[in-house]
Amino acid sequence: MAIPDYQTLMLPLLKILSNGEELHFRPLVEVLSDAFGLSDVERKHLLPSGAMTTISSRAGWARTYLKKAGLIEQPKRGYVKITSRGLSVLEKNLQKIDVKLLEQFPEFIEFRDAGKTEVETQTISTVSDTTPEESIENAFVKLNSQLSADLLEIIKSSSPSFFERLVVALLLAMGYGGSRIEAGRAIGQSGDGGIDGIIDEDKLGLDSIYIQAKRWEGTVGRPEIQKFVGALQGNRAHKGVFITTSDFTKEAQEYVKNINNKVVLINGFTLARFMIENDVGVSTVSTYKVKKIDSDYFVDE
């Protein structure tokens, strides 16, 4: 079963609190997960940021919206309790509680429109099933997806030598190699048909990684990987990285899983992702800090 959105969680959450007891919220997430029959994989599914599970985030926003509408309250930190207004809503035997229903309560309208201009308030016509946090993260993923496509387009139009320098810069940014000068000498100096360069695995040079970097349009198949592995064995090398701007066939991916050499395949998508994560060829345009309450700050000594 799919993980329910935060609006779908509102009514079940309110029903769980219908006995009027003060309940700690964290265990309620598991109760909701049980109610919707979520699998272990779904319960552990993380937001794109990896900061928390999706079900915990959505349950948290369901709690926030119900609280802002006055249907539940937080008598003490970490606990929730239904209010008389919440009990009145349950008595109506509704099939669903959503944002549209909560808009009947002035407190919720005030919360929803806080910080918005008059024009923004008037132009709101639809309500998303995603939480505000998920909307931000989804937009972030979409922006990075487009950025990745743009990066690959530029890389594919660059020269082979530029691509080799880019690979050096990326590996250095990821913590491999010594200095940029040393890494630059390693690339393209081996003279082996199956190897484009060599870079130290660490700054001490305790081991070496052999590199194949190709700007390909077509999918890289098993024969090309076998040729690369043969070159590794010819140099008594144990580790290699094959980087391409395209992708690898399933046969190529399966092949590297069953050989003694440790070979990592990096396709175009992964290459672009590593560049973004390590600030290679990209720059930060804007930064938005999403903050939360620091619970430790409010603990009495």
Image (tube, rainbow, N blue to C red):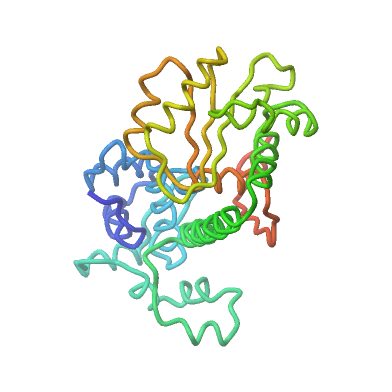
| x and y percentages locating residue 6 in the rendered image | 36, 58
Q: Number of marks in the image?
A: 0
Specify whether 210 is left or right of 88.
Answer: right
Q: Quadrant of residue 253?
A: top left
| Above-or-below relation of 286 to 176 | below
| x and y percentages locating residue 164 in the rendered image | 65, 41
Specify whether 253 is left or right of 112.
Answer: left
| x and y percentages locating residue 115 in the rendered image | 61, 74
| Above-or-below relation of 275 to 202 | below
| Above-or-below relation of 230 to 144 | above
Q: Quadrant of residue 226?
A: top left
Residue at 65% from the left image edge and 22% from the top image edge: 201
Residue at 56% from the left image edge and 87% from the top image edge: 119
Specify whether 36 is left or right of 67.
Answer: left
Q: Using the image as rendered, state which of residue 238 and residue 97 is in the foreground.
A: 238
Q: Using the image as rendered, state which of residue 235 and residue 120 is in the foreground.
A: 235
Image quadrant holding the C terminus, namely top right
Residue at 53% from the left image edge and 20% from the top image edge: 232
Residue at 41% from the left image edge and 75% from the top image edge: 105
Q: Using the image as rendered, state which of residue 162 and residue 132 is in the foreground.
A: 162
Q: Quadrant of residue 195?
A: top right
